[in-house]
Image (cartoon, grey):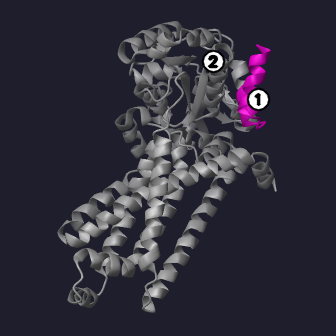
Amino acid sequence: MGLIDFLIRNRAEALALVLQHLFLVASGTGAGICIGIPIGIFLTRKPGLSKLVLGMANVLQTIPSLALFGFLIPLLGTHGIGQVPAVIALFIYSLLPIIQNTFTGIRGVEPAVREAALGMGMTDWQILVQVELPLSLSVILAGVRVATVISVGTATIAAAIGAGGLGTYIFRGLRMNDNQLILAGALPAALMALAADFMLGRLESILKFHRSSGKNPSRKWVPALVMVGIILIGFLTLSRVTRIPPIHRIVVGSKDFTEQVILGELIARQIERRTGLDVERRFELGGDLCHRALLAGEIDIYVEYTGTAFAAILKHQPIADPGAVYVQVKREYLERFGLVWLAPLGFNNTFAILVRGDEAQRLSLRKISDISRYAPRWRAGFGQDFMSRPDGYPGFSRTYDLKFVEPPREMDLSLTYRALANGQVDVIAGNSTDGAIELLGLVALQDDRQYFPPYQAAPVVRKGIVERYPQVAGALNSLGGTVSDHEMRRLNYQVDSEHRDVKQVVNEFLEGK
């Protein structure tokens, strides 16, 4: 009942996400049909190329979706995030089953049938349209069926690049430790896949029946239906891809965790309140997509952390002086990327080494160095970011001389909190301002050897935006120093633990200031 109540209360957003999901699947699979079927037909005329083409399609199918999204961002420039790369990725993943089934279906037509058609004086085009395609349609449709089901599942991951869809609820639920949100995204996606599989399966069965009975009603209506579908999908895709944005518009991005979404909404609302400019929100971008999207001009502003910029992007060895880090980051970003760092918001969200509260009390754990004696019997779980960064696990384990019973489990950051709370791991690296720390009864250990650099949060803006709209910089600089560590933790807690709406939380914060 809780899930149903949630969907009823949020029916407008849920419906919008379902429609976004349907658009992604229809566009990606529709493009796959438009390109894949002609390629499959071509291969039946040039069978010597079939191994090469199908092999290439097979290789494309094996590329992990997030990696493919990452490749597409610099290639697509200003369309590098959002629905365009998502549709392209779904198109690529749909090609193999459609090409393969088209090739197999047409090649499976009895040679005697072709010979009879030739004997009747049919041309190659007439044989294809009036004989081969109708007889192989059920096999081709089976490939479309597989491609559609694959697209429904893969489209959930597209939320990581701001493409929307039901994956938005899934990622948000993982981040907020909310099973209801996860189900709100996963269940409709599963039902969508089952519905597509059932309907296309029924159509496939009907075509098989007519083929086995010698009837061929598909000769007239199937080509017309396919053409109508192609035209509709084409117009829909073009209308979304080529839409003209407002002239005076600022695009605000955020990374894919609660604090970043709050900060993205904070600076978006501040710009709207102080400048009157239109603001578009592109939140919950995974990995380093915000930085790459900013460089590509796909977004104009997002909030970054000085330590992340210093160590992970500029590739410097971490240092402990907050002022020195900020000054160097500000200078190098402007020189190398044409990006402007504005005033820090006021809080420092450093890495927090977390253990369960009862464990910390039982073993008298207060500092990170206290766990070195227990580490050989403990299991660690760290986010991918922490494992790969120069200011992350490699230097951290050396500084504190930590050797765990097995290599740390590398997982999504939001899942590490659950794993720790459920006893599946014994220590994780979270964020010091995260609301989940209090919610799950975790304890942050003191960084007694001062390993972690400062992570002051500040808006980063494209230089062209600052020059064109100086009032934007003024509005955001007025937020400088207004968000303390305690306030940021409280805002995170209100969203993660109390499940309050981000916009409401941000509005209350701004009104209070």
The numbered mark, 2 or 1, whose residue comes first in the sequence reads 2
Give percent across and percent down for residue 375.
Answer: 55, 37
- The residue located at (23%, 67%) in the rendering is 50
Judged left or right of residue 90, residue 420 is: right
Residue ID for mark 2: 271
Q: Quadrant of residue 131?
A: bottom left
Is residue 241 shown above or below 212?
above
- The residue located at (37%, 82%) in the rendering is 135
- The residue located at (42%, 9%) in the rendering is 331
Q: Give the class, few, some or many, for how many residues have Cα within 10 Å of label 2's Cα (few <14, many ≥20).
A: many
- What kind of secondary structure does the magenta stretch mostly adopt? helix
Checking the image for residue 504, the label placed there is 1
Q: Secondary structure at mark 1?
A: helix
Q: Is residue 306 visible?
A: no
- The residue located at (58%, 33%) in the rendering is 283
The three-letter amino acid code for the residue at tag 2 is: Ile
Q: Secondary structure at mark 2?
A: helix
Q: Is residue 293 visible?
A: yes
Query: Is the N terminus in the top left, top right, bottom left or bottom right quadrant?
Result: bottom right
Query: Which contiguous range is marked in magenta?
Result: 490-513
